[in-house]
């Protein structure tokens, strides 16, 4: 019961988690960020509009400077232009002008204030807004001021407003325009409601879809368990019948007449049992078939097997693998052969090909059928499609063995593949070379250009390594700025030096590109693996690491200055030493 509950939880919990994460993302992150961005853009609009109005004043001031107009003419013309200038959805948003003494020069909706000294003018909250305009311009040249003011051209509706003001030094004017905060909040809320409605619709759809998928998975899991239990019960029942039949035949000579009667009864029971067995087998949702172990011919196959192209009379390896001979590799152990050797049930994973040529990963269950002498004569084979599970296992395996930043193997992935390569080298008496590579100037890049540039340098170095080495070579990133390469070759040390020279040429070509902010500089240690020794991959890494540091030390000896963008060209690369085989 606990196992079933745990299986159900594994199916249901991902769906619940997906719905919860979606809701948290919408209400906890996206909506607050969206409201903040919209508000900031509205505020910035008033600044842009003020800059537009100032362009008119700069144009008129230039005409005054060239003598085309007097200052009075230019200022009157500017006042007339800005008095009529409108923008906004209702074309009622406006500009006003006052001077650096808080005297109103022009206001399109409050002409009664024009010409007055408004330094003592306050709003309902006591804010001396016009004096605040002057203070902001005197201190910063421009800025924002929040206060209470009439709604556009409606003097009876006083609302909160935030305005942007900027000084125009040639005439000692202050130009301003603003936005109504209530209007901004209404726009934000209207858009937010639309997003919420859409998000709720998506959330409902995702919840329904997740519930349906979970229900189907639970149902299929339950049907699979029931089928397995029935199959096990049938297998046990068949064994019981065989035992009973053997006991009956042992008394055949003494009870011939009784045997005939009992045989007739037994045959009737067997016929009924066969009918029941065929019904059970045909009801199975997965392929079920019986194989003759002497020739691999399929003697019986249910409807589910036929849907995969597995038919009675054909060889099992032809139907499931498209081959002309039985499986014999490590990846595809032949179930028939294993059952005959062990005389026990076997379970194996195979890659089957259906009648349409599509590949499916399956879990094969093989159970022996014995003759009276205890020899295996037939085998029951039952398969379950595990393609989705294998794909998920592969994705998880790739994630655990790859470096997220560069896409190369991480330390775990590199050690796993390198260990297999060492074992192969021992069997084939092959030759291996391990290169330990360290990025010399990573600290300088991080300190002077930032960690983003450091990450880009790591990615760029990984690309250069992939370009320099062969596809068969194993390349990994095992530390922050440390890389390793395992090369398998029988051409000797000279070839490895050729590879290093090619790598240096590629790096030199990269560094010679224009407008680069940094150069790629590396230190290398190389060690050769002797297949006649018992050295591990960790031993090779340790030795190569030491050689790399010796190489780095030689370069520091030849160049005593600190690294900068142009210093790499002046560093002489010392000759690399390749250690004796270990």
Image (tube, helix red, strand yellow):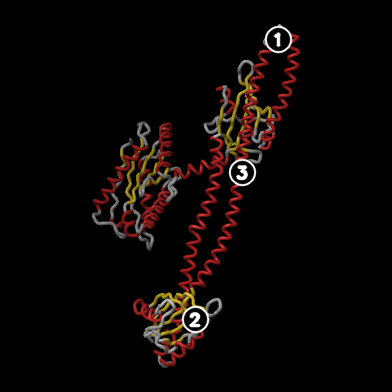
Name the residue: 42% across, 43% down: 474
Contact (Cβ within 8 Å) of mark 2 with mark 3:
no
Q: Left of 110 or right of it: where is 343? A: right
What mark, if any, has residue 215 been given in the picture? 3
- The image shows a total of numbered marks equal to 3
| Mark 3, secondary structure of its residue | helix
Which residue bears the numbered disc 1?
Answer: 252
Name the residue: 53% across, 42% down: 392
The quarter of the picture where the N terminus appears is top right
Locate residue 523, reporting x and y percent.
32, 49
The foreground one among 281 and 394 is 281
What mark, if any, has residue 270 been given in the picture? none
Q: Is residue 524 above or below residue 446?
A: above
Contact (Cβ within 8 Å) of mark 1 with mark 2:
no
Locate residue 43, reporting x and y percent.
46, 72
Q: CA distance from mark 2 to mark 3?
A: 61 Å
* First reached walking from the N terminus: tag 2 or tag 3: 2
Name the image quarter holding residue 103: bottom left
- Check disc 1: other Cα within 10 Å, few if <14, some if 14-19, many if 20+: few
The quarter of the picture where the C terminus appears is top left
Of the two numbered discs 1 and 3 in the rendering, the one whose residue sits closer to the viewer? 3
Q: CA distance from mark 1 to mark 2?
A: 116 Å
Name the residue: 58% across, 60% down: 197
Q: CA distance from mark 1 to mark 3?
A: 56 Å
| Mark 2, secondary structure of its residue | loop
Which residue bears the numbered disc 2?
Answer: 94
* First reached walking from the N terminus: tag 1 or tag 3: 3
């Amino acid at each position: 019961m606990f196992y079933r509950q745990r299986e159900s939880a594994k199916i249901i919990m991902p769906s619940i988690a997906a719905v919860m994460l979606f809701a948290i993302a919408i209400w906890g992150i996206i909506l607050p960020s969206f409201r903040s961005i919209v508000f900031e853009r509205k505020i910035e609009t008033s600044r842009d509009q003020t800059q537009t109005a100032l362009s008119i004043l700069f144009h008129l001031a230039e005409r005054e400077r060239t003598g085309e107009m007097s200052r009075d003419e230019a200022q009157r013309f500017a006042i007339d232009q800005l008095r009529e200038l409108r923008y906004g959805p209702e074309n009622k948003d406006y500009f006003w002008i006052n001077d650096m003494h808080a005297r109103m020069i022009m206001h399109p909706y409050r002409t009664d204030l024009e010409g007055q000294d408004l330094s003592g003018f306050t709003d309902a909250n006591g804010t001396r807004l016009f004096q605040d305009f002057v203070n902001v311009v005197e201190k910063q040249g421009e800025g924002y001021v929040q206060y209470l003011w009439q709604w556009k051209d409606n003097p009876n509706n006083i609302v909160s407003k935030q305005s942007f003001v900027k000084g125009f030094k040639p005439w000692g004017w202050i130009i301003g325009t603003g936005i109504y905060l209530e209007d901004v909040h209404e726009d934000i809320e209207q858009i937010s409601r639309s997003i919420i409605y859409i998000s709720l619709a998506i959330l409902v759809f995702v919840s329904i879809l997740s519930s349906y998928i979970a229900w189907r998975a639970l149902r299929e899991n339950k049907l699979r368990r029931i089928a397995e239990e029935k199959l096990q019960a049938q297998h046990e029942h068949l064994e019981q019948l065989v035992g009973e039949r053997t006991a009956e035949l042992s008394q055949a000579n003494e009870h011939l007449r009784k045997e005939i009667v009992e045989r007739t009864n037994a045959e009737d029971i067997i016929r009924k049992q066969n009918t029941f067995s065929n019904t059970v087998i045909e009801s199975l949702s997965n392929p079920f078939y019986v194989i003759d172990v002497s020739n691999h011919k399929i003697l019986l196959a249910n409807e589910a097997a036929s849907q995969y192209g597995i038919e009675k009379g054909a060889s099992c390896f032809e139907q499931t693998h498209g081959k002309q001979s039985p499986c014999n590799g490590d990846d595809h152990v032949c179930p028939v052969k294993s059952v005959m050797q062990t005389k026990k049930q076997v379970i194996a994973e195979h890659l089957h090909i259906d009648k349409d040529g599509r590949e499916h990963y399956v879990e094969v269950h093989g159970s022996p059928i014995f003759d009276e002498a205890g020899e295996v004569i037939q085998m029951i084979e039952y398969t379950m499609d595990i393609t989705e599970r294998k794909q998920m296992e592969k994705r998880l395996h790739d994630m655990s063995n790859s470096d997220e930043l560069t896409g190369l193997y991480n330390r775990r992935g590199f050690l796993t593949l390198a260990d297999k390569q060492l074992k192969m080298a021992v069997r084939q008496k092959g030759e291996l070379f391990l290169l330990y590579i360290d990025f010399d100037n990573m600290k300088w890049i991080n300190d002077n250009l930032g960690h983003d540039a450091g990450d880009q340098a790591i990615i760029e170095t990984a690309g250069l390594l992939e370009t320099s080495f062969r596809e068969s070579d194993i390349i990994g990133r095992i530390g922050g700025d440390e890389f390793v390469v395992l090369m398998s070759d029988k051409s000797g040390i000279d070839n490895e030096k050729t590879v290093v020279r090619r790598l240096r040429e590629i790096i030199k070509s990269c560094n010679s590109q224009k407008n680069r902010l940094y150069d790629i500089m590396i230190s290398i240690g190389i060690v050769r693996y002797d297949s006649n020794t018992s050295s591990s991959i960790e031993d090779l890494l340790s030795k190569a690491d030491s050689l790399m540091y010796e190489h780095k030390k030689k370069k520091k000896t030849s160049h005593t200055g600190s690294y900068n963008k142009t210093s790499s060209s002046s560093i002489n690369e010392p000759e690399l030493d390749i250690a004796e085989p270990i």
